[in-house]
Image (tube, helix red, strand yellow):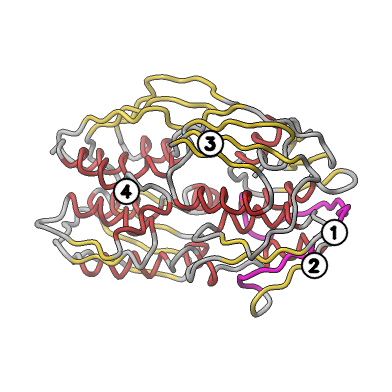
Amino acid sequence: MLSAIAEGTSVLHNFSTGADCHSTLGCMEALGAGVVKNGTEITVHGVGLDGLRPAAAALDAGNSGSTIRMLSGILAGQPFATEIFGDESLTRRPMARIMGPLTEMGARVEARDGKFPPLTVHGTRPLKPIDFTPPVASAQVKTCVLFAGLYADGVTTVREAIVTRDHGEMALREFGAEVTSTAGAISIVGRPRLMGREFNVPGDLSSAAFMLVGALLIPGSSVTIEGVGLNPTRTALLDYLVGLGGSIKILKYGQVSGELVGDLEVKYSPTRAGHISGALAAALIDEIPVLSILGAAGGGLTVSDASELRIKETDRIATIEENMRRAGVEIETRPDGFTVPGGQKFRASTFDSFGDHRIAMAFSVASLIADGVSTIEEAQAASVSFPEFYSHLGRLSQAE
């Protein structure tokens, strides 16, 4: 997105093969940016802050909540209206959390039933700077407002009670925006001159989580995962797993394109009981499905303060419960979480991904420790974020 509104050419190495990221590329092409794809190397010819043009048709965000929410911030600062929609799952995800601040900044956003996609963003220029505190901790909402702040006259500030992922702020700085972060307040100065850059994209820790948990669960495992992003706002996962007794070491550590990157060595380890709540629930919200598998087979897991799971690609509390019961695993659910006792065995079963990539991958990991052959329905959902998942999982299973 930032490459598209920067001046000049950006080259992105190790670009994700996941469908979500390619939905974003399609949207930026439709808005006038030049995109050249060469495997995992993507070249983007930017059009500058004011160079986007109206799309010939509605933009398709696919399954990507990140795309529709963050891009809406950029669309709010355009002198034209844009419709953006997504797949069936995305049309159930709430957008009021971005509509409020964008309206306050001067844009007008229409939505189905007042809160669901498709959205029509009636942009305006210039936007008004705001001082905004999101009611729910969300990196997507924060980034949406900061991206809109690029088109505001003055300083836009987002205040966080719970620190969320800061990839957006880091990328903005790399492209040349003036972004400051102090005491939970992130501010951006409007109307910067963004310049194209060359970037190496780190491996995604949320995707690596499935291999980390799989290696911890399979006796005899010793696995190295190379080039993983170790941004401090993401490494709560590693702290959590090590705190449970997981054997995880960082073998290499360095900085690439503003982000910390390293290689991880993980070995089979019996794990203790875990509890995820408060700020930790916000930090691990994407990893909770696979951590539920580790909890059931290990020392147990209690999750609370995680009602956000209810409005992901699926109601993940409900889909975790359904698949646990299919495997004969005891689970007690609540509106904001669940409890899974430890020391349980997984019965081979037919698991349903419900079209949710993280549920598909989590219960594929569970299948590795089940007592027979399991089937994953709609297994292709994994391609939303990790198309190579099953080939890597096959290699992991050989460690047993």
Circle on res. 249: none
Location of residue 149 with respect to 57 vertically, above or below: above
Give the image location of residue 321, x and y in percent: 32, 68
> Secondary structure beneath disc 3?
strand
* Residue at (75, 30) in percent of width and height: 176
Q: Amino acid at mark 2?
A: Arg
Q: Nearer the viewer, residue 11 or 282?
A: 11
Q: Earlier in the sequence, mark 4 or mark 1?
A: 1
Residue under pointer 1:
124
Residues at marks 2 and 1, CA–CA distance in whole angstroms:
8 Å
Q: Earlier in the sequence, mark 2 or mark 1?
A: 2
Q: Which residues are drawn in magenta?
A: 115-139
Location of residue 351 with respect to 178 vertically, above or below: below
Residue under pointer 4:
273
Mark nearer the viewer, 3 or 2: 3
> Secondary structure beneath disc 1?
loop
Q: Does 290 sit left or right of 145 as displayed?
A: left
Residue under pointer 3:
42
Residue under pointer 2:
108
